[in-house]
Image (tube, rainbow, N blue to C red):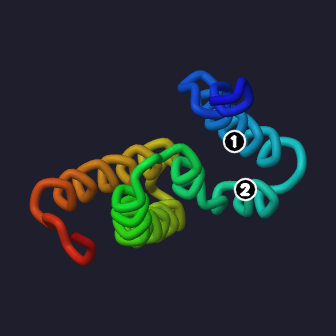
Amino acid sequence: MTSINKIFNSLLFQFLLGGTLVSGITYLANNVSARAAAILVAFPIGLIPLFFLKDRNKERKLSFDTTITNVLVVLTYITLDILLRQENILSKYGVTFSMLFWVVAGLFIYHFAGEVGIK
């Protein structure tokens, strides 16, 4: 394995890549525009680990499961949008509730949805 491969496969590199995306989104939202930040938020970050997986079947499973869970992400943002339109709900409560919705629904998918689609 080359030095470059070792760097790309290190957890530190992957951690820094994720942190760069989060800080980039925050920077764009605060200093450029919400639309630019939203475009970066929509970056398919779930594709990045596919570079690092070594098993084709795991790649296929991750790809399929990510597609399923992206539906959950869309529902979470719809929930947040509905809550933020309510004048009597503070934004931090809307964000917190939406994140809790995502956690509960994600746990449901993980525990009860089982292996669907790709074997």
- 33 shown above or below 69: above
| 77 or 73: nearer the viewer | 73
Q: Which residue is mark 1?
A: 21
Q: Quadrant of the N terminus?
A: top right
Left or right: 53 with respect to 118? right
Left or right: 115 with respect to 56? left
Residue 105 appears in view:
yes
| 98 or 25: nearer the viewer | 25
Question: What kind of element bears circle 1?
Answer: helix
Q: Which residue is mark 2?
A: 40
Q: Say which label, 2 or 1, has the lower sequence index.
A: 1
Amino acid type, residue under disc 2 in the picture: Leu
Question: What kind of element bears circle 2?
Answer: helix
Q: Quadrant of the C terminus?
A: bottom left
Residue 112 figure quarter:
bottom left
Q: Residue furthest bottom?
A: 117
The reply to whether dot 2 and dot 1 touch (C-beta < 8 Å) is yes
| 37 or 54: nearer the viewer | 54
Identify the residue at image location x=53%, y=47%. Answer: 49
